[in-house]
């Protein structure tokens, strides 16, 4: 398993979702990706995107103005 | 064993594309969604910049639709490619700066490329004949099919019975008899079908799904192009036209005044890009100055800004101006009266 990071700050949805989608395409099943965004909308949209595309949300948290989501890439 | 037929549905997040996809899914076709992001999409989160819209759910409707239908969704960033559609629309603009027909042709063409790359069989859209004045007319629907290159691989399930037979129908991939014959601007057939499918919650975009259909937004875009002398734009331009009051006293600059806290927070991200100011002696909004204002312009901008702060009734308001070279000016101005800001300055 490799942990990858994606900085999607200052982007408004759906761009953080698009960047996540594009990054996940480059990763292997089982890899983890930590996405940092400033748009609170990601807290809903990235989990939805993961559910419909078979990826797993491991953790979501807010740190000041950053919303951080860690996901595990599915098959 | 017969091959699983696969279709990609253009999903806007509205009801029609949701119904179109479901209509085909019910016939056993594997359907995945595709959503194109032009930058001009009317998006829940863009609205959510403004506090007044905070009550609305912060959801991306296309993702929500995909989840409701249990299908995958591919969101495609077409911001760069879309510039040519907007700047040079072969079929012209609609009532505002909306190149709807060229836009539809472009998106269907992108979907055609996508099905070729991903070994899918055909394309679905939620178009309804006669529903929209530009891209969804009897005369223009064949143009979309032809000029996109999709031809008879483009199926419009909601009005298929009003149109020539397509390959998915001819090949028996879908049963034409189970498709629909909706036409016109009435939404009643769609509502009835939504009821039939058990859809209780769906987005109803009253003004379409694109900022380019909005008169106010279109005026700001035209102003941007005219004052810049160039029609090129980037995503920051597109986003900034969505927020704040835009007031242009002269061709050298415009002042963007945040209307509420959410906009101010968003505009704060541009403080290093533009000269910016706020009242230092009274509560008031953040403003960005876009262009190349001179010294007098900055003073005028401060007077306009002060008009929108709590010191508007006073004779003297302190304004902090932050220049791009890092210099900070403290100036005192008399706020303009409402009558001293000509209506023509508002973009």
Image: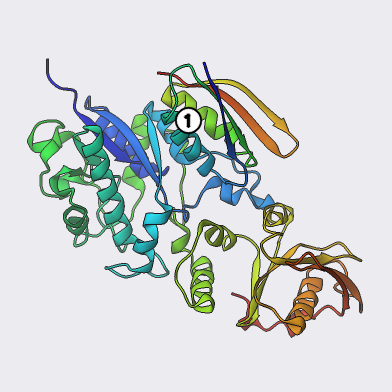
Q: Is residue A14 visible?
A: no
- Which quarter of the figure has residue B20? top left
Q: Nearer the viewer, residue B14 or B243?
A: B243
On screen, residue B13 above or below B41: above
Residue ID at (11%, 49%):
B164
Q: Relative to B302, is B74 on the left or the right?
A: left
Q: Is residue B137 visible?
A: yes
Q: In the rendered view of the protein, which quadrant contains the N terminus of chain B? A: top left
Judging by the rendered image, the residue that carries numbered circle 1 is A49
- Which quarter of the figure has residue B300? bottom right
Residue ID at (25%, 50%):
B109
Q: Nearer the viewer, residue B33 or A19?
A: A19
Q: Position of residue B117 (x, y in %)?
A: 24, 37
Q: In the rendered view of the protein, which quadrant contains the C terminus of chain B? A: bottom right
On screen, residue B257 above or below B23: below
Give the chain letter at badge 1: A
Q: Position of residue B207 (x, y in %)?
A: 46, 57
Q: Position of residue B121 (x, y in %)?
A: 18, 34
Dot 1: element: helix
């Amino acid at each position: 398993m490799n942990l990858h990071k994606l900085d999607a700050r200052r982007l408004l949805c759906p761009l953080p979702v698009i960047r996540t989608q594009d990054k996940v395409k480059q990763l292997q099943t089982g890899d983890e990706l930590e996405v940092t965004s400033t748009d609170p909308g990601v807290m809903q949209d990235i989990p939805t995107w993961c559910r419909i595309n078979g990826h797993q949300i491991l953790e979501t948290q807010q740190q000041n103005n950053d919303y951080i989501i860690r996901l595990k890439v599915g098959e | 064993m017969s091959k699983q037929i696969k279709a990609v549905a253009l999903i806007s997040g509205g009801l029609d594309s949701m119904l179109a996809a479901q209509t085909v899914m019910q016939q056993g076709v594997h359907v995945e969604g595709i959503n194109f992001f032009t930058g001009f999409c009317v998006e829940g989160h863009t609205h959510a910049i403004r506090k007044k819209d905070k009550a609305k759910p912060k959801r991306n409707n296309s993702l929500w639709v995909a989840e409701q239908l249990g299908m995958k969704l591919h969101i495609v960033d077409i911001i760069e490619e879309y510039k040519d559609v907007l700047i040079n629309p072969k079929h012209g603009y609609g009532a505002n700066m909306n190149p709807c027909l060229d836009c539809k042709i472009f998106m269907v063409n992108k979907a055609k490329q996508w099905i070729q790359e991903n070994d899918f069989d055909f394309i679905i859209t939620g178009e309804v004949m006669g529903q929209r004045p530009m891209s969804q007319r009897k005369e223009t629907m064949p143009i979309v099919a032809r000029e996109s290159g999709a031809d008879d691989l483009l199926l419009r399930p909601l009005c298929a019975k009003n149109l020539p037979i397509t390959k998915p129908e001819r090949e028996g991939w879908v049963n034409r008899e189970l498709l629909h014959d909706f036409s016109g601007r009435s939404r009643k057939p769609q509502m009835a079908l939504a009821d039939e499918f058990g859809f209780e919650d769906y987005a109803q975009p009253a003004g379409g799904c694109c900022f380019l259909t909005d008169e106010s937004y279109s005026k700001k875009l035209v102003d941007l192009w005219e004052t810049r002398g160039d029609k090129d734009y980037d995503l920051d331009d597109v986003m900034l036209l969505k927020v704040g009051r835009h007031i242009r006293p002269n061709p050298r600059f415009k002042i963007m005044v945040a209307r509420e806290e959410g906009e101010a927070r968003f505009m704060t991200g541009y403080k290093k890009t533009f000269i910016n100011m706020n009242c230092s002696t009274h509560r008031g909004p953040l403003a960005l100055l876009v262009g190349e204002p001179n010294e007098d312009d900055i003073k005028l901008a401060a007077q306009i800004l002060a008009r929108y702060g709590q010191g508007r009734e006073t004779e003297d308001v302190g304004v902090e101006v932050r220049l791009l070279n890092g210099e900070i000016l403290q100036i005192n101005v008399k706020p303009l009266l409402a009558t001293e800001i000509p209506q023509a300055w508002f973009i």
